[in-house]
Image (tube, grey):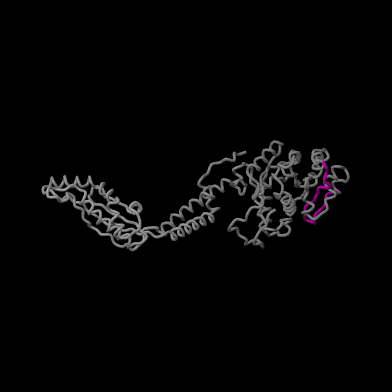
Amino acid sequence: MKSDATGWSLASAWAAVRKFWIVIIGMAVIGGGIGYGISAATTPQYQSTATLYFAMNQGTTGTDLNQGSTYTQSQMLSFAQLATSSRVLTPVIDDLDLGTTPKELARNIAITIPPDTTILQVAVTSTGGKRAAEIANATSEELTKAVEAVVAKSVDGKPTIVPSVIDKAVVPQFQSSPNKSKDAALAAVLGLVLGILVAFIATMADTKVRNEAALARVTDLPYLGSITRTKRGTEAGLIVVREPRSHVAEDFRRVQSALAFANVDGQSRRLLITSASPAEGKSTFSANLALTLADLGERTLLIDADLRRPRAGEIFGLDSAVGLTSVVLGSVDLSEAVIPWRESGPNLLLSGEVPPNSASVLTSHAFADVLADASAHHDVVVIDSPPVLTVADTNLVAPLVDGVVIVVDASRTSRPQLAATIRTLEGAGASIIGIVLNKVRLARGRTTYYTQEKSSGSA
């Protein structure tokens, strides 16, 4: 028995992406669409920038100029603060009739100073390109006046630092934000990442035994094959007779071939078919396996030992009033209770009347004698038994057979359920031959060239 908690690998991650690729791509497309829609609904913003240069207004020697440049650089942060002060912005608001306050206007102005320079840039963002350029130019002009008024004066009364506008703000041709294509691309990437995350979470949360890889995470027991599920709303029934060239009929032949290599001693083989829980298709599997074995020339007997909910009679369309319980109780002989099904079909030993206590029937010496007598007259005895995790009947019969086949519904059986089933059977002394995955989805690209059916069924 393997531990169910196995680590992720690149192969498992890639398998998750392949399985949920539609979800991943869909979330990426939806994310990109949402990002573009939000961006398109956002009010466009335009940015315009004016550039000023600050120079020392005195000094003639190289030393004086160098000291003046250093002094000017030291004042640049002060000038940046001055640019967004009410002293500068109030006249701008009045001149342009903006109808706002200096504090609110300052939020739309970004002042930058390139390192080791005496250059100051006034970038203004507004809903209109023309208005952004007007505010940037007006702010740079008012900043020039304010600097000349507040800086130290020389002996002749002139300002020691003189600002000048070297680049006026111009009306921008394109909006600065939002960037629709960039926003859509970023939202699409986010959607893609979320889609991959959803795929990984869904894969980790999915504990179903859907394929051979999931089966390998639970056990090292042999994988005998898979049975493809039928179309929605279609009962499988005796599908190997109804559709002998279908995918399902081929699936049963592959399982029969795998069983032929199973290590079962003796000429007579007693195969017990069971499952973890009800409605996993074990009874239909047993019936079709018996038909497949009989079709290959094996003298086959199908015994319906599911005395809780017998289904073999229903599947074959026969009355189950006389059968296994009748023989065990001594009402009829085995030869009288066995029903031949068609000329080349298997023999059937149906359930008989459902007893009040099936365990007493299955643990009786008479039942063991029935199995021994049936094995003496048949090459293969296929026994349909109840689900392991529902009742204890299967554990009682398991020691009497040569091997057990576990049928797993790929669409509903969980890994913990399968692990518990295997532990229970091994604890009862059963020899488990292998596992069959039932109701498996038809793989993409699986050819229908040699079959009559374009869609296949399951047991």
Residue 269 appears in the figure: no
Q: In the image, residue 377 lies at what x, y percent?
A: 80, 46
Residue nearest the viewer, comparing 361 with 59: 59
Q: Residue at x 13, y 46 (%)?
A: 64
Q: Main secondary structure of the magenta part?
A: loop
| Residue 208 appears left or right of 369 | left
Residue nearest the viewer, comparing 320 with 44: 44
Tally the numbered discs. Answer: 0
Q: Residue at x 63, y 54 (%)?
A: 441
Residue 185, compared with residue 325, is above or below; it is below
In this view, the residue farthest toward the left is 61
| Residue 358 appears left or right of 96 | right
| Residue 333 appears left or right of 59 | right
Q: In the image, residue 15 lies at what x, y percent?
A: 54, 50
Residue 8 appears in the figure: yes
Residue nearest the viewer, comparing 400 with 380: 400
Residue nearest the viewer, comparing 194 with 45: 45
Q: Is residue 344 magenta?
A: yes
Q: Is residue 97 magenta?
A: no
Residue 248, compared with residue 261, is above or below; it is below
In this view, the residue farthest toward the right is 331
Q: Residue at x 69, y 36 (%)?
A: 427
Query: For the N terminus, which image quadrant?
Result: top right
Q: In the image, residue 45 lies at what x, y percent?
A: 37, 59
Which residues lie in the magenta part? Answer: 337-356
Q: Residue 248 sits in which quadrant?
A: bottom right
Q: In the image, residue 258 lies at what x, y percent?
A: 66, 48
Q: Residue 369 sits in which quadrant?
A: top right
